[in-house]
Amino acid sequence: MIKQSSNTIKLTRKGIHSTLVGIIVSILLAVTKGVAGIIGNSYALIADAIESVSDVFTSLIVIAGLKIASKPPDHDHPYGHGKAEPLAVIVVALALLAAAIIIIVQSIHEIITPHHSPEPFTLLVLILVVIVKESLFRFVIKVGESVESTVIKTDAWHHRSDAITSSFAFIGISIALIGGKGYEMADDWAALCASGIIIFNASKLGLVGLKEIMDTAPPKEIL
């Protein structure tokens, strides 16, 4: 029994460590993208920074979920605290949806508001962001699979969502720069399209957490 408890603690610490790495990286990227977006006149980059900020808050939720889920059974919770993990998954999914809605509202505002094209240097920032976030996704998803944690896997997909929004921003800014006058809104449309990807991922991940909470039976094929 002691061995099992020690193993649980070890796995929890491993999950928390990977999440803390994600938090530090997300903070650095949020500041970088936010400053570059303001100076470089790119709302797609600013929207990307907002997504990174949401990464920080959701990662904190992941840590809280992991700590609570790892607690042993007690008088009030005879079956343990395992449901805290899928609850954290749902909260993370809702945070993703909230970030997507903010991006949609601001993107529409930027589309109907005339502005200048983004600066070329913003493309270099986005290339760096995509590389870092995709690497972080691979690192965190590997940890999530090794400890068999749904909430850590969800956190990993949050990082990939950030990489996707950055990719869309890169495409939008490239179109705006190549197209010239009349294409200034391309990066705003890119941010709008990226929000659709975020909503899709959030819905998919939230459904996974909901099924775990509801103790949904596996498909007939598996049975």
Image (tube, rainbow, N blue to C red):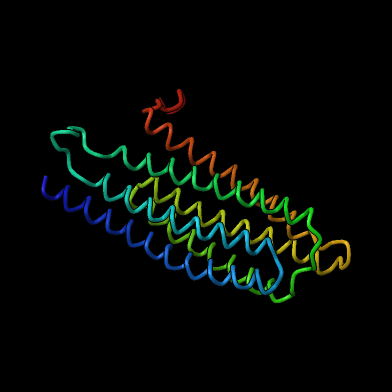
Between residues 100 and 3, which one lies in front from this camera angle? 100
Q: How many marks?
A: 0
Q: Residue furthest left?
A: 2
* Quadrant into which the C terminus falls: top left
For image coordinates 48% across by 59% down, the residue present is 138
Considering only vertical position in the picture, is 162 above or below 153?
A: below
Q: Position of residue 19 (x, y in %)?
A: 38, 59
| Residue 43 visible in this rendered orientation of the protein | yes
Quarter of the view holding residue 87: top left
Considering only vertical position in the picture, is 10 above or below 76?
A: below
Considering only vertical position in the picture, is 181 above or below 198?
A: below
* Quadrant into which the N terminus falls: top left
For image coordinates 68% across by 62% down, the residue present is 43
Between residues 157 and 145, which one lies in front from this camera angle? 157
Q: Position of residue 89 (x, y in %)?
A: 42, 43
Q: Left or right of 219: which side holds 111? A: right
For image coordinates 72% across by 53% down, the residue present is 109
Q: Position of residue 21 (x, y in %)?
A: 40, 65
For image coordinates 43% across by 49% down, the residue present is 153
Q: Position of residue 177 (x, y in %)?
A: 81, 69
Q: Residue furthest bottom?
A: 121
Q: Left or right of 155: which side holds 48? A: right
Q: Left or right of 65: which side holds 34? A: right
| Residue 175 visible in this rendered orientation of the protein | no
